[in-house]
Amino acid sequence: MSTAAPAEHDHHEEHATGLTRWLTTTNHKDIGTLYLWFSFIMFFVGGFMALIIRAELFQPGLQIVDPQFFNSMTTMHALIMIFGAVMPAFVGLANWMIPMMLGAPDMALPRMNNWSFWILPFAFAMLLGTLFMDGGAPAAGWTMYAPLVLQTGDAFPFMIFSIHLMGISSVMGAINIVATILNMRAPGMTLLRMPLFVWTWLITAYLLIAVMPVLAGAVTMLLTDKFFGTSFFNAAGGGDPVMFQHIFWFFGHPEVYILILPAFGIMSQIIPTFARKPLFGYASMVYASASIAFLSFIVWAHHMFTVGMPLAGQLFFMFATMLIAVPTGVKVFNWVATMWRGAMTFETPMLFAISFVILFTIGGFSGLMLAITPADFQYHDSYFVVAHFHYVLVPGAIFAIIAGVYYWLPKWTGRMYSEPLGKLHFWTSMIFMNITFFPMHFVGLAGMPRRIPDYAVQFADFNMIASIGAFGFGFSQLIFLYIVLRAIRTGEPATAQVWEGAHGLEWTLPSPAPYHTFDTPPDPQLIVKEGHS
Amino acid sequence: MGQSSYYVPHDTSWWPIIGSVGLTSLVVGASILLNGSGGLGQFMMLAGFVVTIFMMFGWFGLVISESMAGKYSAQVDISFRWSMSWFIFSEVMFFAAFFGALFYARMYSLPWLGGEGSGVMTNEVLWPTFETVWPSNGPAEIGGDYKVMGAWGIPALNTAILLTSGITITWAHHALKANHRGQLIMGLFLTVLLGAVFVGFQAYEYIHAYNDLNLKMTTGIYGSTFFMLTGFHGFHVTMGAIMLAVILVRCMKGHFTPENHFAFEAVAWYWHFVDVVWLGLFIFVYWL
Ligand SMILES: [Cu+2]
């Protein structure tokens, strides 16, 4: 599969071919391609699990899978989508685009870049292998709360160590991105001339370096509690199960910004291109991203309002969380202001971008509702929460990734995708996504709890609608796969600039981008001309 | 403009994938071992360990030879500096998770179990006789009677040893910059020696804790935090001492110049990092 994409650009010195090339490459474009295909495969694997969940929930009662396996599916769906699909997709886009956007010859540490990727297939082989073990795959939820998770069967240490491996991969990848951005910018590419995708990734990389080790520490304590008799999460020994939740969510809340900040960056590249106007409020976008990242460290306990927390803690975490709406609002305002009176056209990337702005904002508002402590007592662990985070992750993170793929695919492959098929993919995805997740708000507010294979009959209609939407959304993604493969094989040749309104160093390179780019730095005048300010 | 001065390896490298195979074998073996299948687990762990060590020799050897061949410009040097700095920061955050557990247990879990604040009914109903103290192995006294590890014996000595090693490595660094080979090798040798003595004392302390104090990993939250924090720290000191020993060998081979010796500095930073973590340990685990 992965050999298909960059087969075009072979006009270069000898480099390895076949499997050896992909195993041993140190080229940022090859590694970006590997990340993106890996992410695509994991997207389908995790999506398949989501469809098992929705098939079981199509009707009340237990029909298709037993409850233990159902819980495995919700757990694995989340772990795979978060660590296997969304994060690697963003790292893949970073690998492809950041060196080209900065006028750099490659990533700062090319061999470590290869390692960051090639740990992932092993980590996910371990995690998926747990499906076939005694006791089944992990089923305690992706948040792995103690003490429930300690009841996991043989899968337990495999899950813990696979998370360690994913963490090693993420930290190395993030370090590489930081070093690249801080040290590899072409002369003249000042920090405040960097494209916003680069900025948001720089901030994301800091979040990764700060919190992935904390997750590693948390799961290490789970491991020792299970196998070595420690009492971290055992009240009888003086520990506390709630302590796990605190440590986990200290990682977990910044993690959700790891999943969305690069999406903000992609939006800030695409919207100006198709509005044919410079991004409104460039500097405020940078400061807003940094503020969101800072605030993400002091809001984690909003996931835990119902566990029993001192009143002062509840108030602090409620207000700090609501404060995040301010920089997020700045961003949404800026995207809308960029479109205001722009000469807009509606190619597929722009369609996904506009739906991102609207639908992500809906997810943001439901997040604001959840932040209100007394209201959260009602919403907690209900389908309302499921609706909320799917609205920020599906039309948020995933639509941004899809938009980015349509936007940059011509640069990667030298070929255009089919615009009518792209629009078909957009409309089916957008409509089915709303059919899937919008009814979840209603059943959640009416009291349907999350992570259950069966439910009271009064929730039946909305669940049936959601399941139909989910299958529609899932099959729509096969259109996406077809569009990408078709573009690679038979797409129309793309121009260097690709999009009439596109600006930035990457669009000054030929399409497809040569195997090595910016071996000599670009002319500083070009950077000023293509830049933002 | 001209050709970029940044060294980008245009060839391929097998070392990362070898490293992935090694790490995976190591952790799959560990998982199998923990699940109770000793033989296969031990074999896979050993194989994974050997492959990982092989990878480190090969990969670092390649980087050293490239460095010696003068392929790394000042700009490459800066990439290494940023990377090492942020790697150390990630290590700080790893320890932060365990310090967080220690502080949470001491400031919240134990007082609540003792009936403070909203924990009043927990105490009343579940463990009415429990009173908050530190150190503690919890209301169920998990692990049984134990004695507390004192701060002013070996731990205080170890503090002095690590602080001294911080001085000796700085002395070695100044000697390197002043091109005094004898002092450089002496300073580094003393640092490695002090590191080894530290690890030896730590091992003695562990044996003492297990045999004489009945203080074990299973001694409730006190034993858990004690051994997790000092254990990971001891592991980092061991790694640091091995890295220092490699640097010592490279110094004796004359690999470094007064201007160009980032590998030395990286290891020195790392050594200072384990030093600072130890100060936190000494204060919050042993002393207060
Ligand atoms: Cu959160």
Image: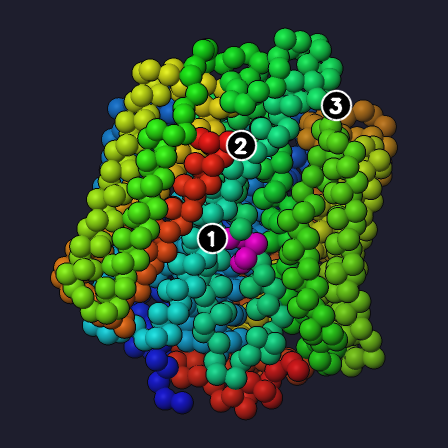
Name the foreground residue: A485 vs A80. A80
The answer to whether residue B37 is left or right of residue A524 is: left
Q: Chain for mark 1?
A: B
**Looking at the picture, how far across and down is residue B95, in whole percent?**
47, 41
Marks 1 and 2, the one that precedes in the sequence: 1
Q: Amino acid at mark 1?
A: Phe
Which span is picked out in magenta?
Answer: A205-209
Residue A274 seen in the figure: no
Q: Which residue is mark 3?
A: B118
Q: Is residue A466 above or below residue A263?
A: above
Residue at the image position 46 percent from the left and 31 percent from the top: B287
Q: Is residue B185 magenta?
A: no
Q: Chain for mark 3?
A: B
Q: Which residue is mark 2?
A: B102
Q: Is disc 1 in the same subunit as disc 2?
A: yes
Marks 3 and 1, the one that precedes in the sequence: 1
Residue at the image position 74 percent from the left and 37 percent from the top: A313
Q: Amino acid at mark 3?
A: Ser
The quadrant the C terminus of chain A occupies is bottom right
**Looking at the picture, how far across and down is residue B129, in whole percent?**
63, 8
Labels in figure, total:
3
Q: Is residue A207 magenta?
A: yes
For label 1, count other residues whose C-alpha is less than 10 Å away and answer few (under 14), some (14-19) or many (20+).
Answer: some
